[in-house]
Image: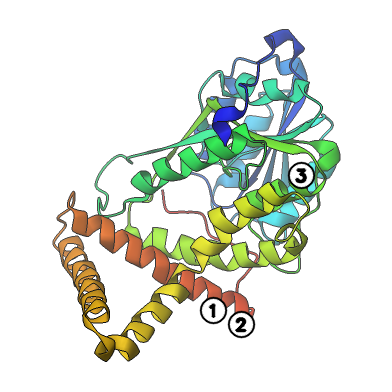
Amino acid sequence: MSLFRGKRKSVKTNSLPPVSILISAYNEEKVIRQRIENIKGLKYDFDKLELLIGSDCSADKTNEILQQESKNYSWMKTVLFEKRRGKAAVLNDLASLAKNEILVFTDANSMFEDDALINLTSGFSNEAIGGVCGRLVLEEPEGKYEKSNKERLYWKYETVLKKLEGILGILIAANGGIFAIRKMLFTKFPEKYAVTDDLFQTLAVLNQNHNFVYEYDAVAHEDVSKEIITEFNRKVRFAATNFQTIKDFKNLLLNKKVLLSYAIWSHKVLRWLVPIFAILLFFSNLFLIKQGSLYYGAMILQLGFYLSVLVGFIFHKLKVSGSIFSIIYYYAFTNVALLIGMFKFLAGKHTYTWDSTPR
């Protein structure tokens, strides 16, 4: 369907809007100074830019670094919170302090290319556009890391989906590392329960009848997790908060904008339910196995798949990667994480605080 939508035209740099960059940080001493330097190097009019960094009661040297750096730049402001309340509460406070018309959300470990902010904000010349998502590129981290983590491969697929949805103006979930919305469309995050912040703001913009688009040339870089267990825990947390976020916007599941509802179901909800479908498929197949060769063959295929998962797990332990078994293993552990996250959501055990990913 995106083939029939014309390409959006960009605007000149001198027409770009004033922006407020918001970063919620918790124990980010290893990357926060580099992040500030990264923003310092952006090609943008700094008379139109402010950087707001909120430290969620960090216990390392993050606060000390922020206090030092904020003295060097007139466009930078830090807010040091004395009580840990979670990312949502920090972003709510930063958004209320922001003085500019465009809010740019990013993370402490995301690194913008020097023209990323120009490209990200160019689309706001169109009044119908309420949000713009940039392109997040996952990189191999320095040093040793577990190459059985196929997150980079999955993310290439996810990037294609975001790009196509963006052409239609119905991008479902922005990249938390680089996206922007109009301040007037900002919806306060719930603080009593956890949501996925980038998905929440994206759906909030769409729910206010504005388009959310994708800007391929607005590029940010992040390192993929070094350990696959770190990625697993992250997916469990996001699975739980994703279900909660969709619950908050359940009206979009059956909306008069049929294409938007279709995108939410096909891109998100049905994917999250794959573990349930897999379990139902296995046991229904087991029940029907005596009904003919078709069901017998289907069971052989399923058992072959799960045997491949086991082989992939063994390869992971032996630190062997690059095979189809590693991809199958990654797919399986992703769906196990989704299942656990679903149970956490149903049990109400997902938390609104978080620990930064090991750097």
| Nearest to viewer (mark 3 / mark 2) | 3
> How much space separates mark 1 and mark 2, taking CA atoms?
6 Å
Would you place residue 15 above or below residue 100 in this image?
A: above
Mark number, residue 205:
3
Q: What element carries label 2?
A: helix
Residue lying at the far front in this picture: please name it. Answer: 292
Q: Which of 301 and 12 is in front in this view?
A: 301
Q: Which amino acid does label 2 sit on?
A: Ala
For this view, does 204 lie left or right of residue 23?
right
Percent coordinates x, y for residue 29 in the rendering:
51, 44
Percent coordinates x, y for residue 272 in the rendering:
51, 65
Q: What residue type is labelled 3?
A: Val
> How much space separates mark 1 and mark 3, taking CA atoms?
28 Å
Decide which of tag 1 and tag 3 comes sooner along the chain.
Answer: 3
Decide which of tag 3 and tag 2 comes sooner along the chain.
Answer: 3
Residue at 40% over, 40% down: 156
Mark 1 and 2 residues: CB-CB less than 8 Å, in contact? yes
The answer, for residue 9, to whether it is visible in the render is: yes
Residue at 57% over, 37% down: 1
Residue tagged by mark 1? 343
The answer, for residue 133, to whether it is visible in the render is: no
> How much space separates mark 3 and mark 2, taking CA atoms?
29 Å
Q: Which of 198 and 222 is in front in this view?
A: 198
Mark 3 and 2 residues: CB-CB less than 8 Å, in contact? no
Would you place residue 320 above or below residue 217 in this image?
A: below
Would you place residue 84 above or below residue 343 in this image?
A: above
Percent coordinates x, y for residue 13 in the rendering:
68, 10
